[in-house]
Amino acid sequence: KIGDSGLETLRDALASARIRALLLDQTHLNTRGFQVLSQALIGKQLTTSLEILDISGNVAKGDGSRYIANFLRNPHSVIKSFTAVRCQLDTTLILSAIEDNEMCRIHRLRRLNLSGNKLTFKAAQSLSNILRETHTLEETFLA
């Protein structure tokens, strides 16, 4: 379990690496960890190389969701698969970030798994828009 402090230790390495997949399932991340992760993800290298992100089982409520949304909103993001199962995620922030990012929404995102998170009405509206406009989304999980 890497936790927030472990991710802080890896921040510089993550920011300069060309990682294709980052699987942080149940690593005990909280708000601080998501802030560190966002800083690393928005770094030039990861923004243009990270295709798969899994943050399942971590607590991403409030500011944690905002930090992840900042990465998903970044127009240079090449994310193809985003998984956040049971994260107490603010789905409104996450889905509106994807909706705002035309390249992600229309041309890149293939898999979206937000299972175990509360889908708000506004989030459902954003998801509806994403599904209507996407050319690539093949799998969506909300259960």
Image (tube, helix red, strand yellow):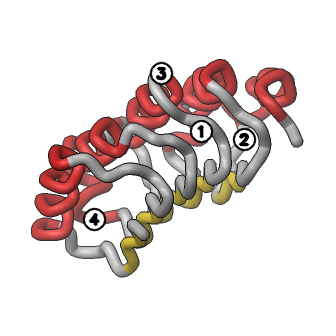
Q: Nearer the viewer, mark 1 or mark 4?
A: 4
Q: Mark 2 and mark 4: span between their CA atoms?
A: 24 Å
Query: Residue 47 at x, y = what percent?
Result: 51, 41
- Whether residues under marks 2 and 4 lie with C-beta atoms below 8 angstroms apart, the answer is no
Look at mark 1 in the image and give the residue it sits on: 45
Say which residue label 2 marks.
17
Marks 2 and 1 close (CB-CB < 8 Å): yes
Q: In the rendered structure, which amino acid carries the disc numbered 2?
A: Ala
User: How far is the residue under mark 2 from the one under mark 3?
Assistant: 25 Å
Which label was assigned to residue 63?
Answer: 3
Q: Which mark is residue 107?
A: 4
Of circles 2 and 4, which is in front?
4
Nearer the N terminus, badge 2 or badge 4?
A: 2
In three-dimensional space, the C-alpha distance between marks 2 and 1, rounded to whole angstroms, equals: 6 Å
Question: Nearer the N terminus, badge 1 or badge 3?
Answer: 1
Q: Residues within 10 Å of mark 3 (few under 14, many from 20)?
A: some
Local secondary structure at mark 2:
loop
Residue drawn 40% across the image and 35% down it: 69
Q: Nearer the viewer, mark 1 or mark 3?
A: 3
Q: Is residue 46 left or right of residue 14?
A: left
Disc 4 marks a residue whose amino acid type is His
Ranked by sequence position, the earlier of labels 2 and 1 is 2
